[in-house]
Image (cartoon, coloured by chain):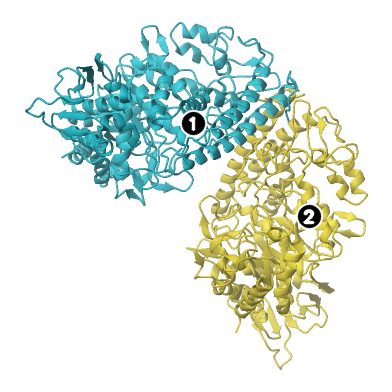
Chain colours: A yellow, B cyan
Amino acid sequence: MPLPVPALPEGVDPAWLPPAAFRAVGGRRTLIRGSGPLVETVHGEVAEACRRFGGRVVREARPDGATYDLVLGLGADDLGDEGFSCARADGTTTVTASGGRGLLYGLFHVVRLGEAAFTGGWARQTHRPALDLRMLDHWDNVAVHPVMGQVERGYAGGSLFWADGRARGDLERVRAYGRLLAACGINAVAVNNVNVHETEAHLLTDRIHEVAAIADVLRPYGVATHLSVSFAAPVVLGGLPTADPLDEAVRDWWGEATRRVYEAIPDFGGYVVKADSEGQPGPFAYGRSHAEGANMLAAALEPFGGTVHWRAFVYNHRQDWRDRTTDRARAAYDHFVPLDGEFAANAVLQVKHGPMDFQVREPVSPLIGAMPRTRLAVEVQATQEYTGQQRHVCWLGPMWSEVLRFRHEPEASVGERARGGLVAVSNAGDDPFWTGHPLAQANLYTFGRLAWRPDADPCEVLDEWIGLTFPEAPERLSDGLHAALDGSWRTYEKYTAPLGVGWMVQPGHHYGPSVDGYEYSPWGTYHFADRDGIGVDRSVASGTGYAGQYAKPWAELYESPDTCPDELLLFFHHVSYGHTLHSGKAVIQHIYDTHFEGVAEVEEARRVWAGLADLVEPGRHARVAERYEEQLRSAREWRDQINSYFFRKSGVPDERGRRIY
Amino acid sequence: MPLPVPALPEGVDPAWLPPAAFRAVGGRRTLIRGSGPLVETVHGEVAEACRRFGGRVVREARPDGATYDLVLGLGADDLGDEGFSCARADGTTTVTASGGRGLLYGLFHVVRLGEAAFTGGWARQTHRPALDLRMLDHWDNVAVHPVMGQVERGYAGGSLFWADGRARGDLERVRAYGRLLAACGINAVAVNNVNVHETEAHLLTDRIHEVAAIADVLRPYGVATHLSVSFAAPVVLGGLPTADPLDEAVRDWWGEATRRVYEAIPDFGGYVVKADSEGQPGPFAYGRSHAEGANMLAAALEPFGGTVHWRAFVYNHRQDWRDRTTDRARAAYDHFVPLDGEFAANAVLQVKHGPMDFQVREPVSPLIGAMPRTRLAVEVQATQEYTGQQRHVCWLGPMWSEVLRFRHEPEASVGERARGGLVAVSNAGDDPFWTGHPLAQANLYTFGRLAWRPDADPCEVLDEWIGLTFPEAPERLSDGLHAALDGSWRTYEKYTAPLGVGWMVQPGHHYGPSVDGYEYSPWGTYHFADRDGIGVDRSVASGTGYAGQYAKPWAELYESPDTCPDELLLFFHHVSYGHTLHSGKAVIQHIYDTHFEGVAEVEEARRVWAGLADLVEPGRHARVAERYEEQLRSAREWRDQINSYFFRKSGVPDERGRRIY
């Protein structure tokens, strides 16, 4: 039976799968060959498109030798479960896959191509994901937290999965979410927050049926379900006196708990663990290493083919700001590099892309280049915690692309090293536009596509997203959207913390500027600005030595302010306000200039958007327009606070005499 | 029937009424004359003391002409309801009052005197409260707020009055609270938060019986009950389309609501209103003045003898920090002085003692000197929002005394001008020690005694509190307690924001330092520190003109940095770090010195307290000792953040070369 396409609840935006995106496919005669659940998903998609656009779809070739415009079929031998190939000859476009997921991805490839899929003839292309795991971590809580709300760092309403204290009864929207994820290549979701609170701990055991219900509706879209678990589960849930990973009873408890999980969800993906991090329990309490902790869970999962994703976000979050010898940036490397080679084959070390925490600009984590004998997953943050919280337009494609193309040594890029997958903290919630800011959908889509092909040109992905989301858009609209999004990350960088130094946000909620907000805090997040200069000396020669965690040539490049790239200068060095950048500008003038420029760029983007009112449906246009107002207000606040702060501190006037308060 | 003394719940501290405080009274033969509810309260007190210490109490003189050690009786003609006189002659101490409250206050006077009340002979003294209203405002919510907790700015547990969403069923502890208040002379309590949320709005109408239950148990201690009400009540509760104070239907609604309040509570004190302040509704919405708003409520209360306390805390809390022409300090004066003479006789304008918000050091509000034709109440804050949140010892007696003795013109002190009463935001809650920090009880007691006699020497009040709370304490203990408390306000001032500039606290919860925490905020709270200097120019000549709100000689004194008192210099002037204080020190060196001194003083106080372990009961000693640890940690944090901030900004090294980070 073909799987019906999910019915979107009234008022929910179809995102990058509006019906019109299926026009080319839906007007054709299509043959689908093969069997299995995902083939039924493919059939349902094509059938729905044909219903709308007048085409036809069959499952068996007619004996009379009728020809088809599109043939989607299983049968390829060597493409893995997710790969597909396609070609067009003699008026027929053929997609062949080895497995159901490959066929579904092939269908969405044809959808993306649109009319081009059915034009002329073209040679066989083969597509396979570069990374096996393309995952979203949802920091969703079942219970609503009185301060954090339901979704930690969520800016798109409540959770898609959980409502009223339990898994949603109506999972039709989760089905629609799974479909969107499949259409951009995402194949795994962790359905709860890595900070596992008391209620959520029970999802592992007595509430696993709720997770299973979610897994059931994601499965037809090739999306595997993972669960964040508490390292203390044997104590909290099992009543054991310890969670020591080398304790036999603890190991047995995890083994049994995991067996029951797989009873409920046979294709369960595995566990995500935040251990010994920001107050979460972990192996340190028992004098065990993180490899010992991770391997215990890996052993429990191994018989069932599951994986543990063990986060490397371990640092001292109760640091004394007076202590300049401790450098949070060093922490992940210092903790984990000594463990390289000790992790089990199904234990993936999940590393944030930068050494700090998803700032608008960070160097690439040196840990990613220093664990050749460990399966690594790289974690990025689609939810815009530090990048405007989906009130600001900040398309992160270029940042992620820079990270993924970065080469610690010439031999391998980050995208190649991420053998354990690419993971994003999701930016989606039960908001009608899925992501709060309608344009933030582009981040979710871009993440999926970059996870499939980390060396893709993000600009092409952006245009792909525009093409799908606004099918048949006139050039003025697609150009306008491209302009609004393309440079938005650099714009955001301009009006916020300068030159890679990071932070300067309001403590707690992290929205809006507070230059000293994290300066005297226990979080390890400092800029050390005084009347003479600013920045953190992380050189080996005179600083914390962080620069030495990189292999050459990066260690040498970052070591000296003369060779360090401008955009990371204050991350690596403390320099005077008069220090001349490679750009030729003094640091202080750079601060002033970029902050004025950033605001001007937001003003321009707002103007461009206003000019598109006739081309965008009113609800979406209004939502974006209203967020531009807030972005502009906030950008001006950033500009004025940052400029005033540094003018008051440095006493250096703006060369151009602009207004600083 | 004598009223039984309240039974304290297990583990609750008796504060300044431990049984031993009644030893002198309890060992005597006492005659009580007169009748009425409060005479029964007096009888119950004496009876309980006699039960413990072997004395006797009777209500009618024996016909055989027996003599008594103590005669407490109604009968004086001219002392008002609260005054009393006392004398001792021929071996009998006589207390005479015109009303029941006076008699109760007279009894507590004898208790305070202890053995001295029964020693020798002494001439008649007459005692009357200088202020008719001595009131506590409880910022207690019925419902627990997810962020603020139950008691806004409360640091002593939950509410004494409200639990589980309603008035406590067992009000025995509220009785005990009333008794403590009577013993220090407090005669009124507002039982709910001035920020009136939805649940609490209903106390005025359908939940007035809960307020009545509280009033019933406070009444025998001479404590009247007041209620904070929402100006929007006619809309929120009455379903009217407006709350316009000149609308007849609105006035009728208030009249009828008030009539019902008095039906439930015949001696109800009146309303407290925070209007047009920090988001609360008010008359501005209808184009009406605050006098019109207050007078409407006054009119509703007038037939029943009630009073409206209308808070003058009206300012723009959405100020743009870039706008230097707006000065929050000016706001109350600017709003209310034009209305002088327009308020009804039973409308009291309740003015915070300083122009900002209960900072550790502020000038006295100029408004207090500028409304001769208005009944004013002066509001202080016993709850230590900005003065250490009952984790730090900060005895506020000297600060309040300075305020009360301040004379805007030679003719009248603040204490004399506060014809509408003295009001404190309560620091009490359901904590076993009532006030979180056991030594913070001294603030509550001192407030009551200063409200009774604003020109009292606060040091004598402190010793009175020590004498009652620690009866029969050896000199080492009373000296130690005196030392710990006496200078604690100045110590706190030393290690926090310097020279009257205020703020520099963590936004939101207001605990701990953040020098720039309120610098770029909408709250009107700035220090304007740059690399050259610091302070707010509030002079008439070059600043906001706030200094001109004072009458001479203060306007002239504050106008110039040469004559402005050191401790307020940065409140009134922006000066360079090198500016020489009257003390002879440069501002920057003063900052360093006071911050090192403040911490040293906390270290010394902690040491003194540790040395008293053998003289204080262990639970109380441990609680205080533990809070000293936190106070010291926090004081060091203040010292280091403030010193580092100003060293980084000014570049001026400490003359004495001490460690600055």
In the image, residue B331 above or below residue A327: above
Q: Is residue B205 visible?
A: yes
Of residues A533 and B142, which is closer to you in this image? Answer: B142
Measure how far apart labels 1 and 2 are at the Cα level.
47 Å
- Secondary structure under tag 2 reads helix
Question: Is A642 located above or below residue B144 in the figure?
Answer: above
x%, y% of residue A374?
A: 82, 64
**Between tags 1 and 2, which lies in front?**
2
* Nearer to me, A646 or B433: B433
**Residue A379 placement (x, y as % from top left):** 73, 58
Point 29% across, 50% down: residue: B169
Left or right relative to B573: residue A345 = right
Q: Chain of mark 2?
A: A
Q: Secondary structure at mark 1?
A: loop
Which residue carries the number 2 mark? A335
**Within 10 angstroms of label 2, few (less than 14), some, or many (20 or more) residues?**
some
**x and y percentages locating residue A596 in the rendered image:** 71, 33
Q: Quadrant of residue A637?
A: top right
Q: Quadrant of residue A180?
A: bottom right
In which quadrant is the N terminus of chain B drawn? Answer: top left
Q: Residues within 10 Å of mark 1 (few under 14, many from 20)?
A: some
Question: Residue shown at 46%/33% (left/top)?
Answer: B439
- The residue sitting at 50% across, 52% down in the picture is A146
Q: Amino acid at mark 1?
A: His
Quadrant into which the C terminus of chain B falls = top right
**Chain letter for the residue marked with disc 1 in the picture:** B
Do pointers 1 and 2 mark residues of a single chain? Answer: no
Q: Is A552 left, or right, of A129 in this rendering?
A: right
Give the residue type that dot 2 points to: His
Instruction: Measuring from the top left, give residue B465's x and y in whole percent.
Output: 40, 27
Which quadrant holds residue A335?
A: bottom right
Residue that carries the numbered disc 1 in the rendered image: B317
